[in-house]
């Protein structure tokens, strides 16, 4: 594996520009903190992104919350930078 763990694999298979749906799952009990942290990350990396479009939903049991976004990406570096920031976020449990 080349690069960091958050770098995309097989970049030659990715076609840019593209719409990129993403689900970000937070740690238990981190609903408000998760939303705030995601807004900070997306707002800094995607200044034109509409932060009001973030959909936050509880899991079936209500223990976890997920934030769903649809991003417009133009380069692999954006993906790598985004995943690195989400990996470092304290409220993020998993990204799908």
Image (spheres, rainbow, N blue to C red):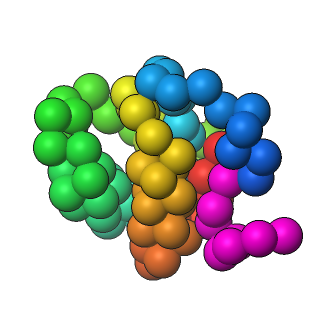
Residue 61 point in image, percent of width and height: 66, 45
In the rendered structure, which segment of residues is drawn in magenta? 1-8
Q: Residue at x 20, y 57 (%)?
A: 44
The residue drawn where x is 77% and y is 71% is 2
Total count of labels: 0
Viewed as shown, does residue 96 lie left or right of 77?
right
Name the image quarter holding residue 70: top left
Q: Which image quarter is the C terminus in?
A: top right
Position of 1 compared to 44: left or right?
Answer: right
Q: Position of residue 77 (x, y in %)?
A: 47, 53
What residue appears at the point 38 percent right and 28 percent down from the top-left corner? 72
Q: Is residue 7 magenta?
A: yes
Q: Is residue 85 visible?
A: yes
Closest to the observer: 89 or 49? 49
| Spot occupied by residue 85 in the image (x, y as percentages of width and height) | 43, 68
Residue 57 in view here: no
Which of the 4 quarters of the picture holds residue 56? Answer: top left
Q: Nearer the viewer, residue 56 or 44?
A: 44
Identified at 69% across, 44% down, the residue is 11
Which quadrant of the figure contains the N terminus?
Answer: bottom right
Per the picture, the main secondary structure of the magenta-coloured stretch is loop
**Residue 73 among magenta residues:** no
């Amino acid at each position: 594996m080349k690069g960091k763990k958050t770098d995309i694999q097989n970049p030659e298979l990715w076609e840019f520009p593209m719409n990129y749906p993403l689900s970000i799952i937070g740690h238990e009990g981190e609903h408000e903190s998760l939303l705030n942290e995601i807004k900070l990350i997306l707002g800094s990396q995607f200044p034109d992104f509409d932060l009001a479009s973030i959909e936050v939903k509880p899991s079936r049991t209500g223990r976890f919350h997920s934030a769903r976004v649809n991003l417009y990406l133009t380069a692999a570096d954006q993906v790598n930078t985004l995943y690195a920031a989400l990996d470092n976020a304290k409220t993020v449990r998993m990204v799908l």
